[in-house]
Image (spheres, rainbow, N blue to C red):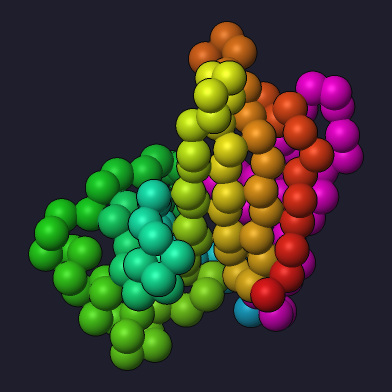
Amino acid sequence: MQWALDGRAIPADPEQPTQALPHRNCGGRLDDGHRPKLVYVAWQLSAEGQQTACNWKYDVATRRAEPLTPDEAKEVASRIAAGTITAEERVFFHSTPQRDGRLRATGGYCWGSAAGTFEFRNDHPVLVSPLTVRGY
C-alpha cells in the first residue's frame, strides 16, 4: 500500500529503481494536502469484483487496514455503483502463490497497476522479479 499510495521504495533483490504508477496523483486530484482519509481495498477479488466491490478499508493516516463488515461492504458497493467513491479512494490487490513458495502479486491504484513476484525474507516481502507497471 505504501508504494502504491506514497511512492515508497519496494525492497528488491537485486535492487531496482522504484517505478511510479502512472497517474499516481490520480490525474491531478491528489496532493499531500488533499489525500483521502480512507482507501477502500479490493483484496483477492476477481477482476470483475474489484471494479464493483471492496472488502477492506485502509486508514491512510495510521497505515492500518481492517476488513469491512458485511454492512460496510454493501454500503461501499452501492457508493461505487453511484460513483461517489472515486479512483483515489480505491485500490486492488490480488496474489497467487507460486509452486516455489514465492508469491505473484498484482495491485492497482488510480489508473495504474503493477505486478511482480515476491519472496518472504525475515517476515517481509522482497521483490525478486522485475516490476511490470502499466497504465489503464
Residue extending farthest bottom: 82
Identify which residue is drawn at 57% across, 53% down.
107
Residue extending farthest top: 122
The answer to if 7 sits in the magenta stretch is yes
Q: Position of residue 101 (x, y in %)?
A: 54, 19
Judge by depth and name the residue closer to the eye, 132 or 22. 132
In the picture, measured across the screen, residue 53 lies left or right of residue 122, that is left
Identify which residue is drawn at 54% across, 29% down.
98
Residue 124: in sight, yes or no? no
The C terminus sits in image quarter: bottom right
| Residue 40 occupies quadrant | bottom left
Residue 107: in sight, yes or no? yes
Q: Is residue 57 above or below residue 134?
A: above
Q: Which residues are magenta?
A: 1-28
Identify which residue is drawn at 63% across, 79% down.
29
Judge by depth and name the residue closer to the eye, 119 or 123. 119
Mostly what secondary structure, the magenta segment? loop
Identify which residue is drawn at 49% across, 39% down.
96
Q: Position of residue 59 (x, y in %)?
A: 40, 51
